[in-house]
Amino acid sequence: MDGLTPSQKAQLREVADLMLEIYRTLARMQYLDHSWIHEGPHNIASLLPVYHSHNLDPSIIYLYSVLPYVDTAGAQQVDFLQGGEFADFRQEGHVERGRDPFYADAEEEALRPWMTPLSLLGNHHSVILYDARKHCIGIFDQESGGSTGHNLWASAVPVEETSEAEKEDEESEAEEGGRGEEEGESDDGEDEDDGEDSEGGECIYDEMDARPARDVLRDIVQWYHDLVETPGGGEQSGEEWDVEIVKPLYIKHGWPHANFDGDDFLVDQARATAATRAKWTAKEPLREVQAIEGELGNDAGRLVQLQQMKDRLASAKTDDEDWLARWELWEAELINQRTLKRLAHAKKEMDRLCPDGQCQKPEELPLWEARQLREDYWSKQRALESLQQQAREVQDGERESEPGIKIRLHYARKQATVYQKALKAAQLDAERLCPGRSLPISVGVESSGLDLKARKKDLTRYIEDTQPEVKLIREWMAQLPDSAHQARQAAQNAVHKNEQYIETCMEQRRGVDLALEKYK
C-alpha cells in the first residue's frame, strides 16, 4: 500500500492532468505531435527498485505513475519550458538526474524525497520543481539561481504553509493517535515524520519561492496562449522555433483561437526559416574573412607565445634544446603564412560573391528563399525515403524492428508534406516578383545535400596547399645536426600529420569524383 489519502492522490492527479494540458497545448501549437504524448497511468512495477533506491516518497512514486510523458522516438529533438528538457521518469537516467536537478553535487541542493522536477535542465536554463507536501511549484534558473516564474508573487506560498492534503493527513493521524491511546497502545517513542531536518540536513528548496501547483501549471498554459512563452528556444529545438520566427506567425494564423490554422502556420514557418537561413548563407564569405582576421588579429596571445619561444631559444643549454626552440619558431611562422594564404583566398571569394559588401540584393530574397526551400525539401524527402526503406526491410524480415519507427515515419511524411507546400508557395512568389529568374542549384545537392563540385575544388586546394608545406619541412629537417633529436622528432610528426591529411583529402576527392560520374 502506498499510504496516500484520497485527497493526496487527487492533488497528484491534478498535477498530472495539468501537465497533460500543457503538452496538449504544445501539440495544438504544432510543436509536439500528439503521438509523442504518452498519458498515464503507467506500469512502473519494474522501476520500483530504482525509485526505492533513491528513497522517493510514495507521493512522488505515485506521481511518476500518472504523469504524462513526451517521447519523440527520435523523430525530432525538442525543448520544454524556458529551454528545459521534457522529463520521463520511466527512464532510470531521468530519475537519477531528478534528484540533483541542477548538477550542484551539494547536499543542500539535493531534492527532498517528496520533491521532484517536472522538467529537466537543458543548457543552463530553467527547471520546474514540485513539492508534494506543500503542493507548490517553483521555476528556477541554473545560472542566476532565481525564479523565472512570470507571476511569482501573484499567489506565493508562505514557507510554513501546509497543503490541504497534508492537513487532512495530520488530522487523520491525530485521530488515529487518540484512538490508540484509548485502546492502551503505547508510543514506541519514534516519530516517523519529525520534519524536514530528519531527511539529512538543510535543503535550499524547503523555502523556495513557489506558488500553488494548480496556479503555476495553469499559468504555463496561459503563458503559451498569450505567447509570453513560445515553444522551443533551447539547445534541442531548431532555429525554426526561434521566437522571432514563430511569435508573429502564431499571431498571423489566429493563435490561440479556435480558428488557428496549424497547417498554414507550419508552411509559413518553413518559409520564414528558409528566408532567415538564406540570408545567413549569403553572408558566409564575410564571416569567413572575419573569422580568419580574428585569428590573425589576436596579437596579444600570439606575441606572448612568440616571446615564450624566443625565451626558450635564449635559455637553451644544449644543441637539442636550441634546435627544438628554433623548430617551434619556424613552425609558428609557417602556420602564420598558411593563415595569410587562407585569408587571401577568403577575400577573393568575398569580393566575387559579395561585391562592395553586398552578398544578397534585397529584391532577390524570394529567389534565395525558393532555392533554400528546394534544398530543405530535398533533405526532408531523403529522410522520408530512408525511413521508408527501413520500414520495408523490417516488413521483409531483413532487419529487426526498431522501436518508434512508425512514429518517426509519420513525422517524416508530415515534414515532407509541409516543405513541399512551402516550396510551391515560395516558387509562386519568386516567379511573381522575379519573373523568369532562378538561382542555380549545384550538382549533388538534390541527392546528397552536398555541392560536389565545390567540395572537389576545396579538397584540391587543401591538397595543393599542404604538399608544399611537407616539402618545406623536409628541407628544414635536412639541416639538422645529429644532436637535434627533439626537433627532428617534432618535424617528423608534422610531416606525418600533413601526409595523413593529404591522403584523407585525396580519398575524399576520389569519392566525390565517383559521385560526379553519375551526373555525366
Image (tube, rainbow, N blue to C red):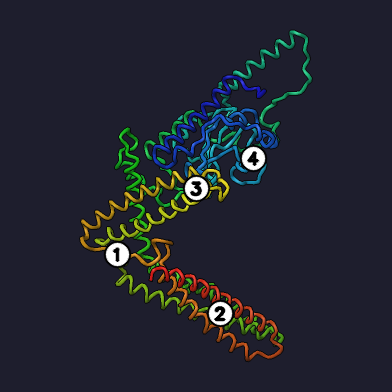
Is the residue marked by circle 3 packed among few (<14), some (14-19), or many (20+) residues within 10 Å?
Answer: many
Which residue is the site of mark 2?
332
* x then y, percent, for residue 481: 68, 91
- Identify which residue is drawn at 44% across, 73% down: 456
Name the residue that disc number 3 marks.
391
Q: Residues within 10 Å of mark 1 (few under 14, many from 20)?
A: few
| Residue 295 appears anywhere in the view | yes
| Mark 2 and mark 3: Cα distance apart in space | 54 Å
Nearest the camera: 313 or 473? 473
The residue sitting at 78% across, 9% down in the picture is 184
Residue 508, percent from left and from top: 50, 71
- Residue type at mark 2 is Ala
Label 4 with label 2: CB-CB less than 8 Å: no
In the orientation shown, which residue stands out farthest toward the top?
182
Q: CA distance from mark 3 to mark 4?
A: 44 Å
Q: Earlier in the sequence, mark 2 or mark 1?
A: 2
Residue where numbered disc 1 is placed: 439
Q: Tell me the distance, in whole angstroms, between the alpha carbons under discs 2 and 1.
A: 42 Å
Kind of element beneath mark 3: helix
